[in-house]
Image (spheres, helix red, strand yellow):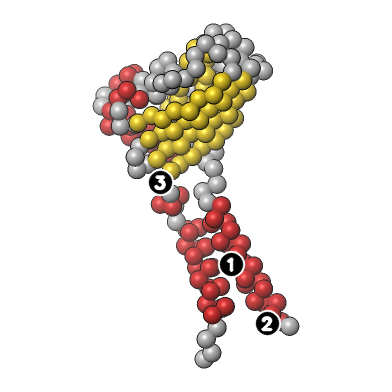
């Protein structure tokens, strides 16, 4: 039988694409990332406001570091708090899970701004004490509850203001970023090579 390297390479690409597609997201990467817009419509009850914002929150499931990138603009009044709530599905309300009243270093007293910070979920200082008490009473139990809520899409981030102390704009952290652009490219490459091979054979 004649050796055909093209046929072998096509089979390898297809097998790799299939294997990657069957591998759970948590096994393909150690980082879970959610990106979402903040709006008054996401609040419960909804808030009428010209304010907008956008956040990207990433959890490294190995180091247990939570990275928060956030921008906001045009709030009706200055900020008084900003944090992540857990654990409830989109549309509901839940208690504050992270530091109160705001993330460390968050710009309080402003109507527009940006924030870039990191929380270590293994430390008590990263949580609202009430969240620890409500979830087993230890940092480890609170961490487990928060991570589970985050992975299940049961967290939301919101910004509170003087005019809207219950929250002016909110983002539900429920839509993960695409797990891998490279995976999609691998699958497309495999399909392209199969099609190209078929065209050559038919000529």
Which residue is rendered at x = 30% and y = 32% of the image? 122
Give the image location of residue 83, x and y in percent: 45, 22
Residue holding disc 2: 201
Residue nearest the viewer, comparing 141 with 127: 127
Which residue is rendered at x = 32% and y = 23% of the image? 125
**Is label 3 in a helix, a strand or a loop?**
loop
Tell me, for residue 74, which label it has, or none. none
In this rendering, the answer to whether 179 lies above or below 70 is below
Residue nearest the viewer, comparing 63 with 96: 63
Residue at far bottom of view: 1
Tell me whether circle 2 and circle 3 mark residues in contact (CB < 8 Å).
no
Mark found first going from the N terminus, 3 or 1: 3
Label 3, label 1: how far apart the Cα atoms are: 26 Å
Which residue is rendered at x = 43% and y = 49% of the image? 29
Tell me, for residue 30, which label it has, or none. 3
Q: In this orientation, does residue 53 appear?
A: yes
Which residue is rendered at x = 56% and y = 73% of the image? 10
Tell me whether circle 2 and circle 1 mark residues in contact (CB < 8 Å).
no
Label 2, label 1: how far apart the Cα atoms are: 17 Å
**Is label 1 in a helix, a strand or a loop?**
helix
Residue holding disc 1: 190
């Amino acid at each position: 039988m004649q050796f055909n390297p093209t046929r072998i390479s096509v089979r390898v690409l297809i097998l790799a694409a299939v294997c990657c597609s069957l591998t759970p997201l948590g096994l393909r990467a150690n980082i879970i990332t959610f990106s979402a817009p903040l709006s008054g419509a996401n609040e419960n009850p909804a808030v009428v406001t010209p304010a907008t914002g956008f956040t990207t929150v990433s959890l490294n499931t190995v180091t247990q570091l939570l990275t928060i990138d956030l921008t906001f603009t045009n709030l009706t009044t200055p900020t008084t708090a900003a944090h992540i709530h857990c654990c409830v599905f989109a549309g509901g309300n839940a208690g504050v899970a992270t530091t109160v009243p705001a993330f460390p270093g968050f710009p309080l007293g402003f109507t527009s701004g940006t924030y870039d910070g990191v929380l270590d979920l293994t430390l008590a200082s990263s949580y609202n004490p009430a969240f620890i008490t409500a979830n087993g009473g230890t940092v480890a139990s609170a961490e487990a509850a928060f991570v589970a809520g985050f992975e299940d899409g049961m967290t939301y981030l919101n910004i509170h203001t003087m005019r809207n102390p219950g929250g002016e704009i909110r983002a539900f952290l429920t839509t993960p970023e695409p797990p891998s652009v490279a995976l999609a490219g691998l699958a497309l490459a495999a399909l392209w090579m199969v099609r190209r091979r078929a065209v050559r054979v038919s000529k």
